[in-house]
Image: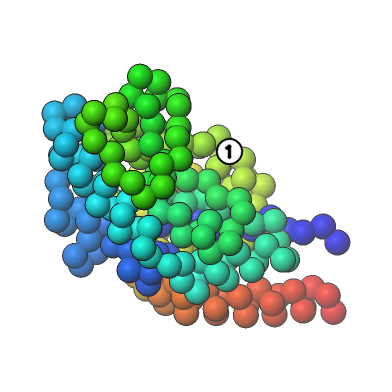
Amino acid sequence: MEKENLVVFTGAGVSAESGVDTFRTDNGLWMNHKVEDVATPEGFKKDKDKVNEFYNNLRELESKKKPNGAHMLLSHLEDDYNVTIVTQNVDSLHERGGSSNVIHLHGELNKVRSLSNTNDVIYWGDKPITKEDNLRPHIVWFGEQPLDINKSIKSIKEADIMVIIGTSFNIEYTIELVNRCGLIPIYFIDPNPDTTIFGDKEVTFIREKAVKGMSQLYEILNKEKEINYN
Ligand code: OAD
């Protein structure tokens, strides 16, 4: 039997239990930093040192974090499904948890781009960058286009099962993006999910943190599989 396509759309919540800060909740990143200063092309033009320092710090912090149970279970799903992860996260925890097919809509902290040719993406690891390097973080800033959007749309359109984990859907285009899926089973794991974004589509809400929620989903999918085989 051919494997079904399972697409997972993730946000900061999937990495929260690894100790990575979310953006808008509690002590989130955007509560303590001005978006226009550290996450816009204009902010970078104005003060490269400030922006580099912000991402140097995040890059170093993220390199010390470990994938959690949710990242691990997502990679185990590859035994039974064609899994595509479409993530807004810039950490590498999905890859380090073992997932092999990850699309990073908002870039990756461990990569940088040359300022003389911004198509030139370079793996950089956890090292800091300075103004003299003539580089910028490989991060999509506000006002810039998300990466690999067509590839993401194609995956979502072809999904047989859709899973959403830990995102507030504050970034508007993401609502339209996930709604490209058909009338398929949709699972949304988040302690505080936005229940409005899928309109009339049927959604199973798992109102838990990512680790517990993913283990519940794993059981649900296994049960579904048994029913399909009988
Ligand atoms: P947000 O901080 O906006 O939302 C985090 C979501 O995670 C919320 O819905 C929380 O309820 C949920 N959450 C918190 N802890 C959780 C846990 N342990 N398990 C599961 N869910 C949990 O983060 P995002 O929606 O990812 O973009 O933000 C989207 C984008 O906005 C980011 O990629 C970033 C930001 O501006 C750029 O920087 C371009």
Q: Residue at the location (50% across, 55% down)? A: 9
Q: Amino acid at mark 1?
A: Lys
Whether residue 36 can be seen here: no
Display coloring: rainbow
Q: Is residue 173 above or below residue 190?
A: above
Graded by Cα atoms within 10 Å as few (under 14), some (14 to 19) or many (20 or more), the crowding at tag 1 reads: few
Q: Is residue 37 above or below residue 187?
A: above
Q: Quadrant of residue 230?
A: bottom right
Q: Nearer the viewer, residue 20 or 136?
A: 136
Percent across and percent down for residue 17 are: 37, 72
Percent across and percent down for residue 211 are: 46, 75
Percent across and percent down for residue 176 are: 46, 44
Q: Residue at the location (23% across, 40% down)? A: 52
Disc 1: which residue = 151
Left or right: residue 43 compared with residue 13? left
Q: Nearer the viewer, residue 103 or 189?
A: 103
Whether residue 103 can be seen here: yes
* Quadrant (top left/top right/bottom left/bottom right) for the N terminus: bottom right
Q: Quadrant of residue 13?
A: bottom left
Q: Residue at the location (29% across, 30% down)? A: 133
Q: Nearer the viewer, residue 141 or 56?
A: 56
Q: Residue at the location (55% across, 69% down)? A: 72
**Numbered disc 1: secondary structure:** helix
